[in-house]
């Protein structure tokens, strides 16, 4: 899965967070392992690894990476879900804080986990904006 958007930059998500290049540029490693769904742990459990994120880079105001689904128990589950048409995105699990104005201060990125597209805060925000625009266009 090439060119997966891991973090859109300079946009406020539904969790009121804004990620910037300057904050992330020194915090991003060259590769990460991830799992299905978010977890509050600061470590990745070997039994839960489903994928690896490689070739991480900044492009067009986004943090991008290539995702390799692994031949692990959880990787097979993720692969089967994706093959059956369930859409996933890959989002960061990190440690840090959020300023009063919503900017993320990242201490460490733990992983990029696979989450359902419909549960993604950026996707939800985009859909809300789209619905508002549709309503406005009907009024005009």
Image (tube, rainbow, N blue to C red):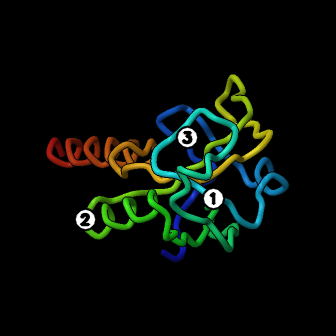
Residue of label 3: 12
Question: Which residue ends up furthest to the bottom in the rendered image?
Answer: 2
- Asked whether 32 or 9 is in front, the reply is 32
Q: Are marks 1 and 3 in contact (CB under 8 Å)?
A: no
**Residue drawn at the location 57% of the way across and 58% of the way down:** 6
* Mark nearer the viewer, 1 or 3: 1
Secondary structure under the numbered disc 1 in the rendered image:
strand
Q: Viewed as shown, does residue 6 lie left or right of 55?
A: left
Compare marks 2 and 1 and give the one earlier in the sequence. Answer: 1
- Asked whether 100 or 110 is in front, the reply is 110
Residue of label 1: 33
* Mark nearer the viewer, 3 or 2: 2
Residue 41 point in image, percent of width and height? 63, 35
**Residue drawn at the location 69% of the way across and 35% of the way down:** 103
Task: Tell me, for residue 85, which label it has, or none.
Answer: 2
Q: Splitting the image into 4 quarters, where does residue 42 fall? A: top right
Residue 2 point in image, percent of width and height? 52, 77
**Residue drawn at the location 55% of the way across and 32% of the way down:** 16
- Asked whether 74 or 14 is in front, the reply is 74
Query: Rounded to the nearest whole Å, what is the CA distance between mark 3 and mark 2?
Result: 28 Å
Residue 134 point in image, percent of width and height? 22, 48
**Residue drawn at the location 28% of the way across and 41% of the way down:** 132
Question: Which residue ends up furthest to the right in the rendered image?
Answer: 26
Residue 82 point in image, percent of width and height? 33, 65
Task: Tell me, for residue 113, which label it has, or none.
Answer: none
Classed neighbour count for the residue bearing mark 3: other residues with Cα under 10 Å, few (<14), some (14–19), many (≥20): some
Compare marks 3 and 2 and give the one earlier in the sequence. Answer: 3
Position above or below: 119 against 101: below
Position above or below: 35 against 51: above
């Amino acid at each position: 899965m090439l060119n997966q958007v891991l973090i859109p930059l300079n946009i406020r998500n539904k969790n009121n967070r804004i990620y910037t290049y300057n904050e992330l540029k020194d915090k991003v490693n060259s590769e990460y392992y991830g799992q299905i769904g978010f977890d509050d742990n600061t470590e990745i459990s070997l039994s839960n690894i489903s994928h690896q994120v490689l070739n991480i880079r900044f492009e067009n105001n986004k943090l991008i990476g290539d995702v390799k689904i692994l031949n692990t128990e959880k990787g097979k589950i993720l692969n089967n879900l994706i093959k059956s048409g369930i859409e996933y995105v890959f989002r960061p699990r990190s440690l840090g804080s959020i300023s009063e104005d919503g900017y993320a201060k990242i201490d460490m990125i733990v992983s990029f986990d696979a989450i359902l597209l419909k549960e993604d805060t950026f996707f939800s925000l985009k859909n809300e904006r789209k619905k508002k625009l549709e309503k406005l266009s009907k009024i005009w």
